[in-house]
């Protein structure tokens, strides 16, 4: 790839970024102090919700759990094929991650891909910059304009990545806070379904459920954005921990270590 082609690619990336950057006037300090940050009361309420869900599942019979899935989520688990349950599972997860008009899982994934493209081009230009400096020093090549162009585009890429990552964190907070507000439904849905699937020894479907749980933890992970963590992140960590615990229940059973069912 020539330098001209790289610069053209940077222009294309810049255009793509402009379609996503709705928080242009938001600096990092403002984002950290935004009203979207959870409070201590939010954390206490979250822990109470999780405890309530665990007790509800622990004290329920298999028949009650299947009835709850049918009543609360319109999910019939008896006398239906795995394909039907998988479709309902995917529909449920998509309704939580890809139905908001403010931010979706897909939008966050697209932002992540842009940062990866920026990193790739940045690494290429850094190598090009080193080579140009080496040529200028060792072979007396007159490439001042090229070196200036490379330096300017490296600076442009750095700012572009900073803006995109800030936007990613801003958008992720909106989506994740909607997940937190609906965490009872999300957590009880997966808890009930995992109970049923383990009881039925449906190993392949168990793995599919674990993959869907990963979609939630991935979205939450976009909030952290390689920055210094703060106390206000604790709620997001609690959510990740509880979802990972559900996933661990699946893997432990598959490995033959679970005796809870």
Image: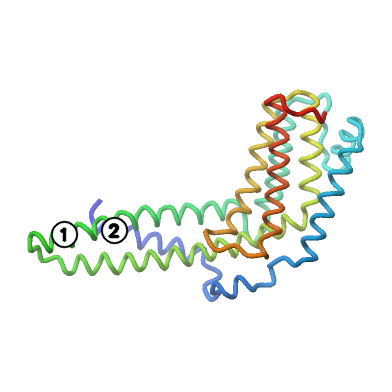
Image spot of residue 108 (x, y percent):
56, 55
- Of labels 1 and 2, earlier in sequence is 2
Residue drawn at x 71%, y 48% is 95
Q: CA distance from mark 1 to mark 2?
A: 12 Å
Lateral position of residue 243 relative to residue 29, left or right? right
Q: Does residue 112 lie above or below 72 as drawn?
A: below
Q: Quadrant of residue 34?
A: bottom right
Image spot of residue 211 (x, y percent):
63, 38
Lateral position of residue 209 relative to residue 22, left or right? right
Q: Quadrant of residue 5?
A: bottom left
Residue holding disc 1: 134
Q: Does residue 101 lie above or below 65 as drawn?
A: below
Q: How crowded is the residue under tag 1: few (<14 C-alpha within 10 Å), some, or many (20+)? A: few
Residue holding disc 2: 126
Residue drawn at x 71%, y 33% is 250
Image spot of residue 55 (x, y percent):
88, 43
């Amino acid at each position: 790839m020539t330098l001209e082609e790289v610069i053209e690619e940077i222009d294309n990336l810049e255009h793509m970024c402009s379609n996503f950057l709705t928080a242009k006037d938001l600096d990092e300090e403002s984002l950290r102090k935004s009203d979207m940050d959870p409070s201590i009361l939010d954390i206490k309420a979250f822990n109470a919700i999780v405890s309530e869900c665990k007790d509800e599942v622990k004290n329920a019979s298999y028949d009650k759990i299947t009835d709850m899935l049918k009543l609360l989520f319109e999910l019939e688990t008896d006398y239906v094929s795995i394909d039907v349950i998988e479709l309902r599972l995917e529909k449920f997860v998509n309704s939580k991650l890809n139905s908001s008009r403010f931010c979706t899982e897909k939008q966050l994934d697209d932002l992540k891909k842009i940062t990866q493209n920026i990193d790739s081009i940045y690494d290429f230009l850094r190598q090009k910059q080193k080579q140009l400096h080496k040529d200028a020093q060792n072979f007396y090549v007159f490439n001042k304009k090229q070196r200036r162009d490379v330096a300017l585009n490296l600076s442009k890429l750095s700012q572009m990545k900073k803006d995109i990552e800030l936007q990613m964190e801003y958008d992720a907070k909106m989506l994740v806070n909607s997940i937190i507000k609906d965490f009872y439904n999300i957590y009880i849905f997966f808890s009930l379904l995992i109970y049923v699937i383990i009881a039925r020894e449906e190993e392949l479907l168990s793995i599919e459920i674990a993959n869907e749980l990963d979609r939630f933890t991935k979205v939450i992970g976009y909030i952290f954005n390689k920055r210094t963590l703060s106390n206000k992140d604790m709620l997001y960590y609690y959510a990740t921990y509880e979802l990972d615990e559900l996933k661990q229940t699946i893997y432990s059973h598959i490995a033959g270590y679970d005796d809870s069912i």
